[in-house]
Image: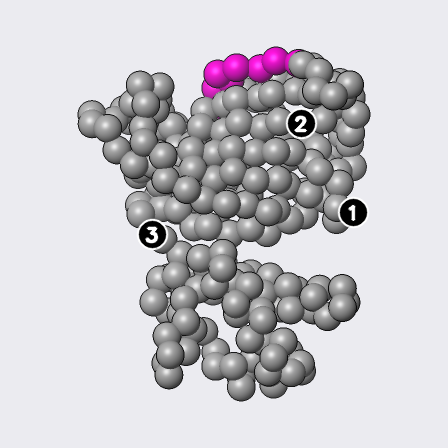
Amino acid sequence: MEEKEAVFKKIGDDIKQRIVIEKMIPGDKLPSENELVKEFQVSRTTIQRALRYLEKQGIIRKEKGKGSFVNIQKVQVEIFNFSGFSDYISRMGKEIVNKIVAQEIYEDDGKQMMKLKRLRGMKDDAGIVWLTLDQSIIGLSLFPGLENYDFEKESLYDVFRRDYGVFPQYSHLKAKAVISDSCHSTYFDLQDTTALVKIEGTVFDAHDNVVEEVSIVYNPITDFNFLVSV
């Protein structure tokens, strides 16, 4: 049973990667179920489960008699969740900027935890634009000494990979709308109260260890693409 479940989720994840690599946009049609059956060499039932898996995440929508279509919400500045914020901003030719809003060490059920809250954005000749407000909750048993790094200068995931040999692999996330507060208005230069996209969830490594609990609020200028593989 577990093996069969892993197959349809892997196919779903492969389709998500295709959406990224091929830069598909909302309304683009996916291959038909028959085409996917031939491509992945699995049963039609497995393909249908994979598509339902993506539909539940809001990544695709199914239209009866027409097929499956990309359903990722689009706004303005493109970011793919957990798949290379730093790389993406660099490709835009912008300077990456981070600002620590809060950082603390605390104990939870006998475990040392670090809470890191940062603004992340880009800088050019016109100034700094903050794109996200990120909060990470990280267990220090997996990352001893992490609190000694300067995460205004360092990439959190680069440190995970380079210094701890931990590679974030996948995530379980949920999206919801939140109403902007005074902090959001200040950080994102909002003139009026507005609805913002907030992502919350857990990031895991390939061995199913929890890497971080994450919460991200997006500036409304952000072109939000909800993807869950790292």
Q: Position of residue 226 (x, y in %)?
A: 46, 50
User: Splitting the image into 4 quarters, where does residue 71 fall?
Assistant: bottom left
49 and 60: which is toward the camera: 49
| First to last magenta residue range | 96-105
> Can residue 189 be seen by looking at this rendering?
yes
Q: Which residue is identified by label 2?
A: 138
- Residue 207: mark: 1
Q: Position of residue 183 (x, y in %)?
A: 35, 19
The label nearer to you, 2 versus 3, is 2
Q: What is the C-alpha distance between the residues marked 2 and 3?
A: 30 Å
Upstream in sequence: badge 2 or badge 1: 2
User: Splitting the image into 4 quarters, where does residue 193 fall?
Assistant: top left
Please, is residue 62 above or below residue 95 in the view?
below
- Identify the element where label 3 is drawn: loop
Does residue 138 show up magenta in the picture?
Answer: no
Please, is residue 140 above or below residue 83 in the view?
above
Left or right, 75 with respect to 110, comes to left
Q: Which residue is identified by label 3?
A: 74
Q: Residue at image x 31%, y 28%?
A: 180
Q: What is the C-alpha distance between the residues marked 2 and 1?
A: 16 Å
Q: Amino acid at mark 3?
A: Lys
Pick the quarter of the image with the N terminus. bottom right
- Identify the element where label 1 is drawn: loop
Q: What is the C-alpha distance between the residues marked 3 and 1?
A: 32 Å
Q: Residue at image x 75%, y 46%?
A: 208
Q: Residue at image x 61%, y 17%?
A: 150
Q: Amino acid at mark 1?
A: His
Please, is residue 63 above or below residue 175 in the view?
below
Q: Amino acid at mark 2?
A: Ile
